[in-house]
Image (cartoon, grey):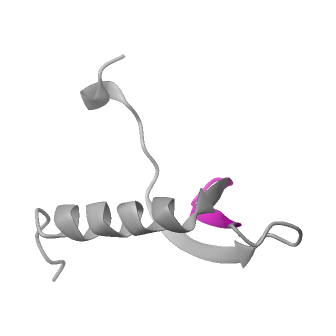
Amino acid sequence: MTEERLKAEMLKGYHFFHHPDLPTVGILRLDTENENHFVMVTKEGLQHLAEACLKHADDLKETQ
């Protein structure tokens, strides 16, 4: 399946949790309309994600 054919739900919210046992990882919860997705992340991974989000945010138009 190509990227153009993927169905994606709108991101409704997120929350970051510190891992209770591992200080080098965290858990990022991404909330969509129908479900929540949990992803383990490192500091480096979060920094790369933040950079990518900022880059792609510039590609989108503002909502009115």
Q: Which residue occupies 69% across, 67% down?
A: 24
Left or right of 6, for residue 51: left
Q: Position of residue 20 (x, y in %)?
A: 87, 72
Left or right of 34, for residue 3: left
Q: From the image, give the main secondary structure of the stretch colored magenta.
A: strand
Determine the image quadrant of residue 39.
Answer: bottom right
Q: Is residue 43 one of those drawn in magenta?
A: no
Q: Which residue occupies 57% across, 72% down?
A: 14
Determine the image quadrant of residue 7.
Answer: top left
Q: Position of residue 37 (x, y in %)?
A: 65, 53
Q: Please give the range of residues in magenta.
A: 25-38
Q: Is residue 26 one of those drawn in magenta?
A: yes
Q: Which residue occupies 28% across, 60% down?
A: 52
Q: Position of residue 64 (x, y in %)?
A: 15, 83
Residue found at the very far right of the displayed protein: 21
Q: Which residue occupies 18% across, 65% down?
A: 55
Which of 12 and 50 lies nearest the eye of the viewer? 50
Residue found at the very far top of the displayed protein: 1
- Which image quadrant: the N terminus? top left
